[in-house]
Image (tube, grey):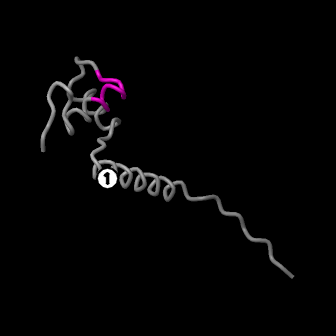
């Protein structure tokens, strides 16, 4: 005769730690390929420069691309 398996709810602490680890791994992977984290940028701007505007994601992405690869007005050769 089979015994019913007790259903234990997932531990919220374990799930939270897994989620945090996943976010950190994703952030590390993005930084490794030159894609900075917009959420980190927004948190920094709001904490350190509350009187200044925060770029939109599109503006942030373009600015980071230009900084890494250069823009048409200021190309990087190397």
Residue 74: horizontal and vertical position, in percent? 14, 28
Instruction: Describe residue 47's horizontal placement relative to residue 24 as left or right.
Output: left
Q: Where is residue 40 in the image (x, y as percent from the top left)?
A: 30, 38
Query: Crowding at label 1, few (<14), some or many (≥20) Cα neighbours within 10 Å?
Result: some
- The C terminus lies in which quarter of the figure? top left
Magenta-tinted stretch: 54-62
Q: Who is closer to the viewer here, 35 or 12?
A: 35
- Residue 3 in the figure: left or right of residue 40: right
Image coordinates for residue 31, horizontal then vertical, percent: 28, 48
Q: Is the magenta stretch mostly helix, strand or loop?
A: helix
Q: How many labels does the image show?
A: 1
Q: Is residue 38 magenta?
A: no
At x 28% / y 26%, what residue is drawn? 46
Residue designated by label 1: 28
Q: Who's the residue at 51% across and 55% down the image?
A: 15
Tell me residue 45's x, y (percent): 25, 28
The residue at the point 21 percent across, 38 percent down is: 69
At x 31%, y 43%, the residue is 35
| Magenta span contains residue 55 | yes
Of all residues, the one furthest to the right in this rendering is 1
Q: Report the front residue among 72 and 48.
A: 72
Q: Which of 2 and 56 is in front in this view?
A: 56
Q: Quadrant of the N terminus?
A: bottom right
Drawn side of residue 26 relative to residue 7, left or right: left
Q: Is residue 17 left or right of residue 75?
A: right
Which element is circle 1 on? helix
Q: Is 59 above or below relative to 14?
A: above
**In which quadrant of the rendered view does residue 61 lie?**
top left
Asked where in the image residue 21 lies, by quadrant, the reply is: bottom left
């Amino acid at each position: 005769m089979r015994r019913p398996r007790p259903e234990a709810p997932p531990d919220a602490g374990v799930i939270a730690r897994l989620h945090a680890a996943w976010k950190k791994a994703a952030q590390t992977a993005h930084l490794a390929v030159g894609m900075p984290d917009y959420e980190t940028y927004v948190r920094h701007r709001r904490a350190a420069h509350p009187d200044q505007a925060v770029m939109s994601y599109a503006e942030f992405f373009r600015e980071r691309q230009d900084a890494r690869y250069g823009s048409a007005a200021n190309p990087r050769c190397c």
